[in-house]
Every structure is written in structure tokens, then in C-alpha cells.
Image: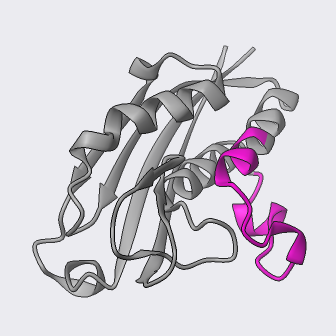
Amino acid sequence: MTIRIGNGYDIHRLVAERPLILGGVKIPHELGLLGHSDADALTHAIMDAMLGALSLGDIGHYFPPTDPKWAGADSLVLLSQVQTLVKANGFRVGNIDSVIVAERPKLKPHISAMRSRLADVLELKPDQIGIKATTNEKLGPVGREEGIAAYAVVLLFGD
């Protein structure tokens, strides 16, 4: 059995007139994340971790922001495509651990739904997906509520 670990990071700017989507869940908030796709920073960090574990590059390689095909794309659809790549390379996700860094809104009420949405796409049990939320203690761009960041670590098993 082969084991691979990957880590991922993503950050997107908060702006008006955009939905706030994290882990595939639309979260009520007056600001949303700006990006070429739906700007789901958590899902993007997870995808980068999955790709990184297999030395397959990053999501920009597969879903470039310069390609109009990906404009407004649902990140869970992109995650499904990354999952297909992982399987095609003979691996499966063992577990995911992640952190979302945001001053607002409070994310704890939405974590269970995020875990369920991600688990459905990745064919996992929700308890294989850890999602934590924290603030940046008012420091830096995240602390000034200019953006939301996410970090993820993924463990892959191969035959």
C-alpha cells in the first residue's frame, strides 16, 4: 500500500454582490468571495491538496482562470473531476483535515452541511472530513475582513 499526503491553500477576496460559498454550501452573508469560478476557497484548498499529493500540479493547471469554460463553475463539480483524476491514478482519499480562516460570518452552524456535501462528492463518510473554523484575530487581510482563506491536508491511499 502506498500513502501520499498533500496540502493545499486558497484565499479569495470578499466583495459585495457575490454569494459566499464554502464547502459547497451557500452561507448567508452580505459579502461573497470573488473568483473566476464560485470562489469556494475551502473546496479549492482540498483540490490542491489532492492534486499535490500525487504531484499533479494545482487547480490552475486543470481549471485555468483564463478559460471562460470555468467562469462561475460550481467548485463541487471541479472537485468531482479531481476525484476522478485521483482514482485514475490508483488512489483514494483516506481523510481530509481543513481550516477555514474568516473573521465573519460564524461558520460553526454550517460545518456539518459542508462535511456532508464534500463527503457526497468524494464518496466518503462525513467523519472522514475535518473542517475547523477560526479567525485571524483581526490581523492581516483576513483579519480586516478583506478575504477568507482555507488550508487543507489530504491523506491518499493507493494499491
Rendered view: 110 above or below 100: above
Q: Position of residue 13 (x, y in %)?
A: 45, 82
Dividing the picture into quadrants, the one containing residue 20 is bottom left
Along the line of sight, the residue nearer the viewer: 45 or 14: 14
Query: Is residue 150 inside the magenta stretch?
Result: no
Rendered view: 84 above or below 58: above
Point out the residue furthest to the left here: 137
Along the line of sight, the residue nearer the viewer: 143 or 55: 143
Rendered view: 4 above or below 105: above
Q: Position of residue 72 (x, y in %)?
A: 72, 68
Q: Is residue 140 left or right of residue 33?
A: left
Rendered view: 9 above or below 123: below
Q: Is residue 124 left or right of residue 77?
A: left
Q: Quadrant of the C terminus?
A: top right
Q: Is residue 116 left or right of residue 99?
A: right
Q: Position of residue 23 (x, y in %)?
A: 49, 47
Dividing the picture into quadrants, the one containing residue 31 is bottom left
Dividing the picture into quadrants, the one containing residue 16 is bottom left
- Extent of the magenta region: 56-80
Residue at the image point whose x is 26% and y is 51% from the top:
107
Residue at the image point whose x is 67% and y is 13% from the top:
1
Residue at the image point whose x is 57% and y is 19% from the top:
124
Residue at the image point whose x is 78% and y is 73% from the top:
71
Q: Position of residue 60 (x, y in %)?
A: 74, 69
Q: Is residue 61 visible?
A: yes
Query: Is residue 59 inside the magenta stretch?
Result: yes
Q: Is residue 58 visible?
A: no
